[in-house]
Image (cartoon, helix red, strand yellow):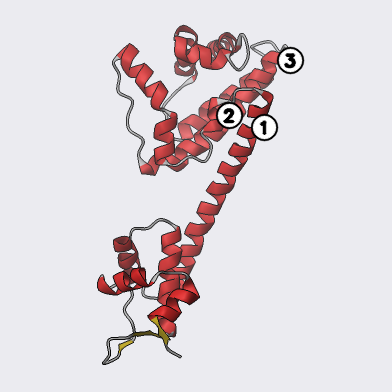
């Protein structure tokens, strides 16, 4: 069965203008053009259009869609790849929706959202926006340009933000519950956190981590960020990290 441009547009929701453009750039050519100039599309063309629309849903530029379809002529292979890409987007959207839900709940309570929570599930542009204030502060006060966020780093950054949220929540709750800074449970969490950081591209030991937490105490921006979550949080985190570093040095 053959379909006219008008019928394909009605069936798929793609505008006639877009179909003409797809033909013009060689992305989707009709199976035949009549002597009168009418374009006709068959089953194979509709299947190709379906693949194009899947890629459009993933925000692929038309030139990249054309290349992807040329590189993957097998329809099932193409669909399998698109399924994986769409599933990855679904997971990220679900993560963003959970973050938005939490933002709404906290907003209604008049509470500020934890910075690490705000970063969960972000893309490159969203990370750049989220880090803009901190980057400007570091540049103005210390003359240091924070490195630009790279697309390849985004998944790693989201994983680190999620783990950082769990770590900070644990330490903050330990402070609230009155645990000593050298409590074995806290020391174990610190050990796991530093191991996680080193497994995700960092090169940091217990002494360097303690120095980092000392910076959080001394620096206005970072101290305020922690103290806004819980009074005494920045000092408690530093004390716990310093005790862990001292304990590690003794063991060595």
Q: Position of residue 109 (x, y in %)?
A: 68, 25
Q: Which callout, 1 or 3, points to the residue nearer the camera?
A: 1
Residue at image position (36%, 35%) is 149
Q: CA distance from mark 2 to mark 3?
A: 18 Å
Q: Which callout, 1 or 2, points to the residue nearer the camera?
A: 1
Crowding at label 1, few (<14), some or many (≥20) Cα neighbours within 10 Å? few
Asked whether the beta carbons under mark 2 and mark 3 sit within 8 Å of each other, the answer is no
Residue 105, labelled with which disc? Answer: 1
Q: Earlier in the sequence, mark 1 or mark 2?
A: 1
Residue at image position (29%, 91%) is 34
Height in image: 176 above or below 165? Answer: above
Q: Earlier in the sequence, mark 1 or mark 3?
A: 1
Task: Answer left or right for 190 relative to 201.
Answer: right
Q: Which residue is mark 2?
A: 165
Crowding at label 3, few (<14), some or many (≥20) Cα neighbours within 10 Å? few
Height in image: 128 above or below 25? Answer: above
Height in image: 47 above or below 34? Answer: above
- Tag 1 secondary structure: helix
Task: Answer left or right for 127 relative to 24.
Answer: right
């Amino acid at each position: 069965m053959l379909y006219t441009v008008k019928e394909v547009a009605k069936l798929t929701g793609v505008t006639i203008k877009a179909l003409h453009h797809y033909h013009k750039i060689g992305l989707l050519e009709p199976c035949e053009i009549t002597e009168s100039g009418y374009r006709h599309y068959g089953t194979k063309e509709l299947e190709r259009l379906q693949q194009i629309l899947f890629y459009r849903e993933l925000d692929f530029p038309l030139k990249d869609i054309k290349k992807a379809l040329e590189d993957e002529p097998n329809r099932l292979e193409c669909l399998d790849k698109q399924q994986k890409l769409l599933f990855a987007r679904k997971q990220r959207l679900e993560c963003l929706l959970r973050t938005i839900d939490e933002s709404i709940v906290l907003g209604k309570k008049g509470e500020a959202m934890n910075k690490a929570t705000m970063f969960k599930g972000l893309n490159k542009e969203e990370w750049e926006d989220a880090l803009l204030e901190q980057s400007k502060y570091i540049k103005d006060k210390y003359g240091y340009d924070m490195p630009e966020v790279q697309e390849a780093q985004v998944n790693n950054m989201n994983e680190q933000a999620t783990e950082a949220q769990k770590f900070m929540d644990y330490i903050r709750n330990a402070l609230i519950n009155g645990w000593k800074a050298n409590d074995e449970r806290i020391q174990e969490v610190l050990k796991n956190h530093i191991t996680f950081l080193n497994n995700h591209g960092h090169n940091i030991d217990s002494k360097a981590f303690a120095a980092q937490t000392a910076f959080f105490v001394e620096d206005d921006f970072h101290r305020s960020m922690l103290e806004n979550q819980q009074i005494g949080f920045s000092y408690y985190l530093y004390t716990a990290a310093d005790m862990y570093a001292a304990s590690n040095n003794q063991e060595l």
